[in-house]
Amino acid sequence: MQATLNRRWLTVGICLSLAVLTWLVFGQTLWHDFINYDDPRYVYENTKITGGLSISGIAWAFTHIHSLNWHPLTTISHMLDCQLYGLKAGWHHFTNVLLHTLAAILLFLALKQMTGAVWPSAFVAAVFAIHPLRVESVAWIAERKDVLSGILFMLTLLAYVYYVRLPRIGRYLVVVLVFACGLMSKPMLVTLPFVLLVLDYWPLCRIGRQSLDGRRQLLIPVLEKIPLIALSAASSVVTFLVQKGAVGSTADLPILERINNAVASYVLYIWQMLWPVNLAVFYPHPENRLPLWEIICSLLLLICITAVAITLRKQRPYLIAGWLWYLGMLVPVIGLVQVGWQGRADRYTYLPQIGLYIAVTWAVTDLTALWQHQRSILSTAALLTVVVLSWRAWVQTSYWRDSETLFRHALAVTTNNDVAENNLGIVFLGQGKVDQAISLLQTAVDLRPDNSPAHENLAKALLQKGQVAEALIHYRKLLELQPDNIEVHNIVGTVLVQQGRVGEGVEEWQKVLSVEPDNGNAMSNLAWVFAASPDQSLRDGPKAVELAEQALRLSGGRIPILFRTLAAAYAESGRFSEAIQTAQQGTELANSQGNPGLATELKANIALYRERQPLRDHSLTNASSSRHNE
């Protein structure tokens, strides 16, 4: 009884220690900001997320794609954060750290249940908790899917052990349910049925064990995985469909380049596990730049490790189990099916490297079994390892405090990093350092001419600089890369009008409406040109009224400048009393919203309409004149 009580208190103590260790490393993120890479579309610029948790929001999460993924539970978790904390970044970080802490504790409990080895299980969980490669998954709010799926992965392991000990349909259904939830957090969990099959070999010893009639017990463990494999297959199909055509997709990279990078990445991840330095938020894909010797050496090393693990499978079954865990779990993200321009990513090791931790930890324990002072030596080595890794992880986490620090560090430890150049350029643009932003963004474009965000951001920077013609070049390039980008068509239309090419601007806005008939920006822009252009050939009063009325309806009557546009359209059509009434409504709305400049302009327009004169936008005349003088 006392021994049982002591074991329980030991388990509680280890769980508390894991929690304290995790927060010592990652607690600093509570004072960190959002970063400008994926956080905008995942959280703070996504109105579906910032609106908080609601029935309609939950329905949207299950029926729509969020950031090129279908992971409704992750989406809902971001909604819940916004509901509870608003857009206070520190609290969003709090959720990530809390989830990661729980994942580490659950990993310890799962390994302890499966192996009965308390201290090796605790060490594996500790390394998982604080290894520097975990930083990206924990310190990046957009990577909520990692830590959330990590909890569900561990819960699936626990549920599976519970089922294996006493197979019952109810217990099996719990495994299926938790696994399904994991897939709805991050599709990378599609390999979990394979991991369970590996665990059936070791440490659960359900495969390879002799039955009473001498037959190998393989069929039942395989059959058990069929429903889980079916869920994985369905998730894989959905993921492939929603990510098809993504930037840096499989179609953009030759198969040989993807295979070469996959082989090299398997080995690089092992090296980073042993020597976690020069870690970055983004590693550019090497494409065809990998040296042949590196590919060959990496392949030979993988073959040798596999051969050793197979050879020692009977004496050291944890080697093949841990190695297959690592190899198998990385398959979805190793780059054979490419999404994005990264060569590899620290976050991809979040769950796969647990297999390596298991193999190394159990191997060291076995190899030192005959040492006279094994316990003291291993305890000291384990403590030193955890301290060093915690320190390195703390330092790495500090780089994530804001976008500028993060991408300056990325540029310091990588080369040819167009993503880091682009995102640091965005930071400088927001700080008003336009020249520095242009330099960085131009470098990003030079490094990768089909980097769509870099072209868009460079165009914005050039517009701020007043270099309209140069900005238009990059907007045109962006439209070549993304011909259905509605927002860019709208912007190009505006830029063309600013250059005096009003007719071409009108064509751009008409393209927008052909793709998206309810686009309010294009409607209001066209209505203004049709109502107020000095060029008689461009004016069309009835069409202007139709577009302006529709744009006003779509806005819910909350945008005062649309009242100005509709009033001008009425005036162009000779409906001056309606123009006056509409302009007066716009004046009242502008004043109520604290926009006295627009209110004054509308009062001047009313005076014009009372004299039964239509409005003319003379800036268009000036632009047209400048065009003809060039």
Image (cartoon, rainbow, N blue to C red):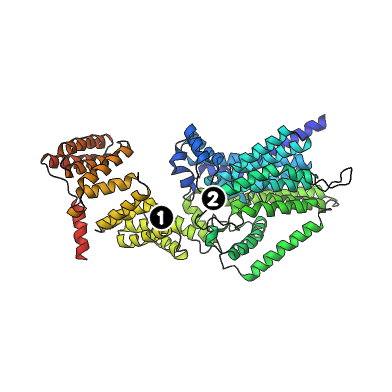
Q: Where is residue 447 in the image (x, y as percent from the top left)?
A: 47, 65
Is residue 282 or residue 22 the one in the foreground? 282
**What's the residue at 71%, 38% (across, down)?**
158
Q: Which structural element holds mark 1?
A: helix
Whole-number angstrom distance, CA of label 1 to CA of label 2:
36 Å
Q: Where is residue 445 in the image (x, y as percent from the top left)?
A: 43, 63
Q: Position of residue 506 (x, y in %)?
A: 28, 53
Residue 605 appears in view: yes
Q: Position of residue 62 (x, y in %)?
A: 53, 39
Indicate which disc residue 241 carries.
2
**What's the residue at 65%, 62% (across, down)?**
263
Residue 7 falls in which quadrant of the image? Answer: top right
- What amino acid type is highlighted by mark number 1? Phe
**What's the residue at 67%, 43% (across, down)?**
228
**What's the residue at 71%, 44% (across, down)?**
225
Which residue is at the far bottom? 292
Residue 100 appears in view: no
In what quadrant of the picture does the N terminus appear?
top right
Q: Are marks 1 and 2 in contact (CB under 8 Å)?
A: no
- What amino acid type is highlighted by mark number 2? Leu
Neighbour class for label 1 at 10 Å: few (<14), some, many (≥20)? some
Q: Is residue 556 left or right of residue 239?
A: left
Q: Which of label 1 and label 2 is nearer to you?
A: 2
Q: Is residue 512 left or right of residue 306?
A: left
In what quadrant of the picture does the C terminus appear?
bottom left
Q: Name the residue under label 1.
A: 428
Neighbour class for label 2 at 10 Å: few (<14), some, many (≥20)? few
Q: Which structural element holds mark 2?
A: helix
Looking at the image, tell me whether mark 1 or mark 2 is earlier in sequence order: 2
* Total marks placed: 2
